[in-house]
Amino acid sequence: MEFGDTVLIADPDEASRAELSGVLSDAGYAVTQTDRGDDALSLARSIQPSAVILEIPLEGLCGYEVCRQLKADASFEAPIIFISRVRTEPYDRIAGLMLEADDYLVSPYLPGELVARLENLIARTRPQAPNPRLSLTNREHQILDLMSEGLRHGEIARRLFISPKTVSSHVDHILRKLGVRSSREAVTVAYREGIINPQANAGPATATRQPR
């Protein structure tokens, strides 16, 4: 979960909404509520919540129809969960899942289980940050390896047969890609992310002359 994640609840029962809202608020979510399906549909499209939780019987549009329309909307990517105290039979759950709902729970539910399921679904739909290991060039990998051995820019330049200015330029790119401000931080992140293998630097490094 990230700060500011909002969950939209659509349930005609005020007590059920209040209970669910309390569970989500305690878990750190902001909550928007409605008792109507047509309102849920318009709210989902306008506020773009991190997740939508629906009961099946709703005024205006039923929960199944809200789910169907949102799933047909290519611009809407948030997970949809059914939580129903009314439609609890296996065929009800099958119908919801066939409409591409991301999960279906019956009430009463375990608050901890609900929050865990919700967090997992939100995490799956959130865009993933690019892996820095994949964005470094071969030359940047070479320089990062030598940085991890404690070599200065001039030493790295001599080792790779390039100019110190070229080394500095590559180091700037490395720091930016790894999101750090110093060579020491870059090496720390590289070890943590597995970009550098500590065993690879056990012996003396060697390099062949390569074009700049």
Image (cartoon, rainbow, N blue to C red):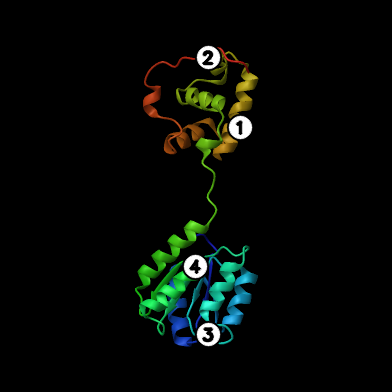
Residue contact between numbered discs 1 and 3, judged by CB atoms under 8 Å: no
Quadrant of the rendered structure where residue 138 is?
A: top right
Residue flagged by tag 1: what amino acid is it? His
Residue 100, which numbered label? 4
The answer for how far apart the CA atoms under marks 1 and 3 are is: 54 Å
Sequence-first disc among 4 and 3: 3
On screen, residue 152 versus residue 111, left or right, reads right
Quadrant of the rendered structure where residue 33 is?
A: bottom right
Sequence-first disc among 1 and 3: 3
Residue contact between numbered discs 4 and 1, judged by CB atoms under 8 Å: no
Of circles 1 and 3, the one toward us is: 3
Residue 58, which numbered label? 3
Sequence-first disc among 4 and 1: 4
Residue flagged by tag 3: what amino acid is it? Leu
Q: Position of residue 208 (x, y in %)?
A: 52, 13
The answer for how far apart the CA atoms under marks 4 and 3 are is: 19 Å
